[in-house]
């Protein structure tokens, strides 16, 4: 059996787009392009930056959302969500949807697919491979630093992730050395939660962390998300928790709540 973070959410977004009679890439929406950030690498970087799908505002961006996809997906998967968030035109927010590297995934018989880390078992305590999580977190950190170097301060950057992508967000943000605008962790869990107490950086303890989960999720059961939320709050982080009547996907109510949250943390 192949286990993927196949996003019913993306089907939902396309369904809404078709119903409204609009296209996610029409002239009224931000242009989307594939960007390879290798050219932005500095001499101190040890590896090329992750390639991304980019959605840019009409004006010069003064904020950035970096959104990490789930297992088996790509940066293209969540890109159609941008127009569905219906952010005010006055918000000059750039969205980056990086592609995870391809790697063999043990739980899927060694099949190569885009994954932020290997999954060797479905056991709660050992589902996420720590070495892979740390490797991907370092790559995403380089991407954040590239945005800072381009002129967007860290406190105007939101790190978001769905499922596997959320694991990376929850691993990196509490350890990051500059204050972020916010963290969005959707239908996800935490890698090695017992490590956080000794590794956490206090600088993001007041940073808003929105955590959300489907109460019918069979891929990442809701108790795993709830446990991650408990770990965050017990370690002094400013996390909130919300469940929705859905499976391993996102729903329109959740998108509306994400939009309101983004407007709040990036106001």
Image: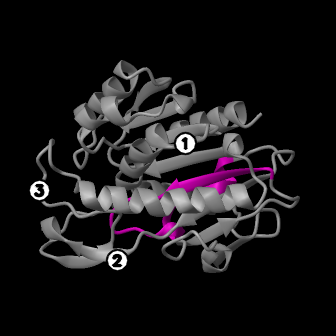
Q: Is residue 128 or residue 246 the one in the foreground?
A: 128
Q: What residue is drawn where x is 12% and y is 74%?
A: 109
Q: Is residue 213 magenta?
A: no
Q: What is the quadrant of residue 266 in the picture?
A: top right
Q: What residue did someone put label 1 on?
A: 177
Helix, strand or loop under label 2:
strand
Report the Cα–Cα distance between label 1 and label 2. 28 Å
Dot 2 or dot 3: first in sequence order is: 2
Q: What residue did someone put label 3 on?
A: 121
Q: Is residue 234 left or right of residue 93?
A: left
Q: Give the magenta-colored segment's residue range.
A: 62-85
Helix, strand or loop under label 3:
loop
State if disc 2 and disc 1 touch (CB < 8 Å): no
Query: Which class describes the residues within 10 Å of circle 1: few (<14), some (14-19), or many (20+)?
Result: some
Q: What residue did someone put label 2 on?
A: 102
Helix, strand or loop under label 1:
loop
Q: Given the current orientation, which residue lies at the most extreme front position?
A: 44
Where in the figure is residue 259, as x and y percent of width and height? 65, 39
Foreground mark, 3 or 1, reads: 1
**The C terminus is located in which quarter?**
top right
The number of discs equals 3
Q: Is residue 73 magenta?
A: yes
Report the Cα–Cα distance between label 2 and label 3. 18 Å
């Amino acid at each position: 059996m192949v286990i993927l973070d196949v996003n019913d959410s993306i089907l939902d977004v396309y369904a809404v787009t078709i119903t409204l009679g609009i296209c996610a890439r029409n002239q009224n929406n931000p242009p989307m392009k594939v960007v390879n950030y290798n050219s932005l690498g500095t001499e101190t970087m040890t590896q090329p930056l992750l390639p991304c799908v980019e959605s840019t505002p009409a004006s010069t961006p003064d904020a950035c959302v970096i959104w990490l996809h789930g297992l088996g997906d790509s940066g293209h998967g969540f890109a159609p969500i941008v127009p569905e968030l219906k952010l005010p035109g006055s918000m000059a927010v750039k969205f980056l949807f990086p592609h995870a590297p391809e790697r063999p995934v043990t739980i899927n018989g060694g099949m190569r697919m885009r994954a932020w880390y290997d999954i060797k078992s479905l056991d709660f305590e050992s589902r996420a491979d720590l070495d892979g999580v740390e490797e991907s977190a370092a790559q995403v950190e380089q991407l954040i630093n590239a945005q800072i170097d381009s002129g967007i301060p860290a406190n105007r950057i939101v790190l978001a992730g769905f499922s596997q992508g959320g694991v990376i967000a929850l691993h990196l943000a509490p350890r990051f050395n500059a204050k972020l605008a916010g963290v969005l962790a959707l239908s996800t869990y935490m890698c090695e939660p017992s490590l956080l107490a000794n590794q956490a950086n206090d600088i993001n303890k007041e940073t808003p962390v929105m955590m959300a989960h489907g109460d019918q999720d069979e891929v990442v059961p809701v108790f795993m998300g709830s446990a991650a939320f408990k770990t965050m709050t017990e370690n002094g982080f400013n996390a909130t928790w919300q469940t929705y009547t859905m499976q391993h996907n996102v729903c329109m109510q959740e998108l509306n709540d994400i939009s309101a949250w983004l407007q709040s943390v990036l106001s």
